[in-house]
Amino acid sequence: MTTTNNGRSNVLTGCSTLPPMEPPRPRQGTSTGKGTEKPKRTAVTSNRFGELNAFVDCSMADLTRAEALTWLVLWRDTKNGTVRTALTDIARRIGASKRAAVDAVAGLVKRGLVSRIHRGGMNRGVSVYRVQPLGKPTANG
């Protein structure tokens, strides 16, 4: 602000009025009636929490920490029924060594909670898995 000789304050030139405000945009996920509704669930994704509940209620208690966390990482990354995740990425995300991730995946495959569709490796890309919430029954129970 500047002051004139008579003691009154003047507003700086160009700042006397503010530009008009734009109306607020609707937040994503809110319905405005123009095609912004939630997408319909597909058969593949419609039972995601049912799978998680079955795993937590029936399978998780018998697993090691690394196996349980590995299953959760694989389940989270599942798209179209399969998952493509590198073992080094799994190890980093569960906070363990690559060897622990390899052992965890092997344990999950042995219990029937994960099936390996494609074995990855050098010049073969990452492995592809299918995740099941319930393993195959054992002889003990």
Image: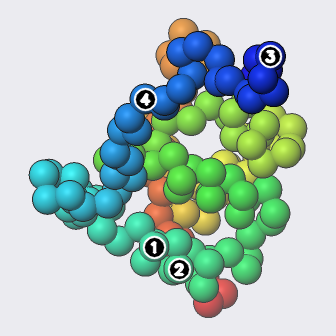
Mark before the other along the chain sequence, 4 or 3: 3
Mark 4 closeness class: few <14, some 14–19, many ≥20 residues within 10 Å: few
Report which residue position mark 3 lands on.
Answer: 5
Q: Is residue 6 above or below residue 56?
A: above
Q: Is residue 17 above or below residue 105?
A: above
Q: Amino acid at mark 2?
A: Asn
Q: From mark 1 to mark 2, how far is it between C-alphas? A: 6 Å
The furthest residue to the left: 34
Please tell me which residue is depicted at 65% across the width and 24% down the height of the picture. Answer: 11
Colour logic: rainbow
Q: Position of residue 107 (x, y in %)?
A: 69, 56
Marks 1 and 4: which is nearer the front?
4
Report which residue position mark 2 lands on.
Answer: 53
Report which residue position mark 1 lands on.
Answer: 49
Report which residue position mark 4 lands on.
Answer: 19
Marks 2 and 3: which is nearer the front?
3
Mark before the other along the chain sequence, 1 or 3: 3
Mark before the other along the chain sequence, 2 or 3: 3
Mark before the other along the chain sequence, 1 or 4: 4
Q: Amino acid at mark 4?
A: Pro
**Residue 109, located in which quarter of the rendered image?**
bottom right
Please tell me which residue is depicted at 66% across the width and 87% down the height of the picture. Answer: 140
Q: Nearer the viewer, residue 48 or 21?
A: 21
* Figure quadrant of the C terminus: bottom right
Q: Amino acid at mark 3?
A: Asn
Q: From mark 1 to mark 4, how far is it between C-alphas? A: 49 Å
Mark 3 closeness class: few <14, some 14–19, many ≥20 residues within 10 Å: few
Q: Secondary structure at mark 2?
A: helix
